[in-house]
Image: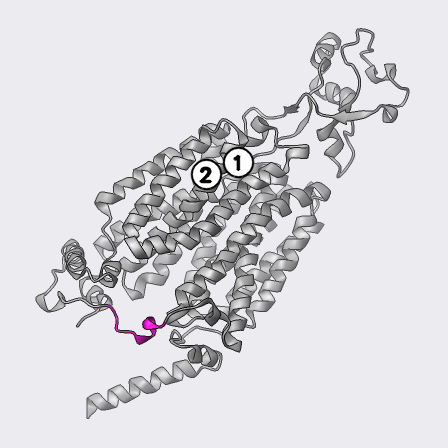
Amino acid sequence: MPTLDDILEHIGEFDLFQKQIFLVLCLLSVAFAPIFVGIVFLGFIPDHHCLNPGVSELSKRCGWSLEEELNYTVPGLGIPGDTFISQCRRYDVDWNQTTLSCTDPLASFASNRSHIPLTTCQDGWVYDTAGSSIVTEFNLVCADSWKLDLIQSSVNAGFFLGSMGIGYVADRFGRKVCLLTTVFISSLSGVLMAISPNYASLVIFRLLQGLVSKGSWTSGYILLTEFVGPAYRRTVSIVYQMNFTVGLVVLSGIAYIIPYWRWLQLTVSLPTFLFLLYYWCVPESPRWLLSQKKNARAIKIVDHIAQKNGKPLTANLKALSLEDDDTEKLSPSIKDLFRTPQIRRHTLILMYLWFSASMLYQGLIMYMGATSANLYLDFFYSALVEFPASLIIIFTIDRIGRRYPLAASNFIGGVVCLIMLFLPEDIHWLKVTVTCVGRMGITIAAQMICLVNAELYPTFIRNLGVMICSSMCDVAGIITPFIVFRLTELWHELPLILFGVVGMLAGGMVLLLPETKGKTLPETLEDVEKLGKGKLKENKICLQTEKSNDADN
């Protein structure tokens, strides 16, 4: 009885139908970018200082320019590396006094301004921006600055919690049902974020969006890979991830045009309701239907694919089955991920690689948002370098292998972070260029780790292994905002030191993994133990030789 892969070889592994589905589903990857890193623009932190009652009237009376007003009334200006006083403290004086001098107003309170007491920004802040952000609307600065970190951490916490349930929904009720459900909830929560009346509701809707949005991206990824043949799956999966970069580029342009966070959030959320049209243009996965013993529906969909590709399904190919694999009947357990020495080492290293890739990828984006001189252009340039990163993977993964490119990309990401410590602030183009190199390196690592992860586990725990290890990227996403924004308050370059160490350590740990290029996928725990010794490939060659001899006889 032919398998689905056998039939796809006959009716087209990546023909007209698959190409149309590919173009349609890739839009999910584009739309996921604003959810994943949109906080860079939604939570933009402009220059700010305390609102001083009476200062504006005094400034008008004296005819001060904005620069003069700040110099006369804001403490701590001009202190290198220390913005806390100028942004979070004000002089504890009464600016409404009519006797204040226009040339030195603070002389009325003390001969030396350093002796004037300071107080907190009790009346709010003044922000140097023409637009608005979550920060400016809810005053998430100074003592409340950690609340901005919590907004981004909440969406990553949603990714982490949602990954535990979305996979079950996709396997139990189908890929299409899971996709449509998560798309609707994600779109709705995105709109609710834009109209949130207060900070608490904003965090709740952000968490809700995180619970389902990664599930919609994953459902599209699974559907796409299950519709195409084996020869095209790897390339299609990489290009699907590449469309996330398209989303980053588009996001930078939209954010530049719409500098108001509520309108920006609506602009990136409302169009995603159109994904509900997938109900009519994207069929259910025939592989899932076969796994649920719904062979008639599976054959009907496969026949539709064949007609669309102009290669009608012959009668002898209309009996479908799943691959007969005894290893799938084994019950996977988390204990299996640590059962033998080799697989235990794989699991621990892969968990760290997922963690480090996510920390550096999100960390570099957030660090750029917190320190960039021109946020929109710098974000745009750094997003563009992700395109060659994907192409490098496509052209090197089967020529050079997995281990050395993965190790090099992690190492480059880490080294670049340390190099940035020594770059002068006034040479902006050099800093942007070096940042882009690091961004490209960690992008390669982030995309390659998914493939390597799947190739290092036996069939019966492959999905479980990827799920458990990849959950560490969400853990990293939860803590990275606090690392970036809190450490930059202490010293702007401090996060870079941490990222550099984490990235270089990841590059070294990759070299402890076996090379999987040209190796058959392991089927059992015993195969994993042999993986680094090249025995799997030899066994396959012997088996093929024996089959050839049997055929000749």
Kindly indicate whether the residue at mark 2 contacts the one at mark 1 (C-beta within 8 angstroms): yes
SS label for mark 1: helix
Q: Quadrant of residue 399?
A: bottom left
Question: Crowding at label 1, few (<14), some or many (≥20) Cα neighbours within 10 Å?
Answer: many
- The reply, left or right, for residue 370 in relation to residue 88 is left
Circle 2 packing at 10 Å, graded few (<14), some (14-19), many (20+), is many
201 vs 179, left or right, is right
In the image, what residue occupies the spot 36% across and 62% down? 234
Q: Which region of the structure is painted magenta?
A: 322-330
* Residue, disc 2: 251
Identify the residue position indicated by label 1 in the image.
41
Q: Amino acid at mark 1?
A: Phe
User: Is residue 328 covered in magenta?
Assistant: yes
Secondary structure under the numbered disc 2 in the rendered image: helix
Check if residue 87 falls in the magenta segment: no
Q: Residue at x 30, y 44 (%)?
A: 180
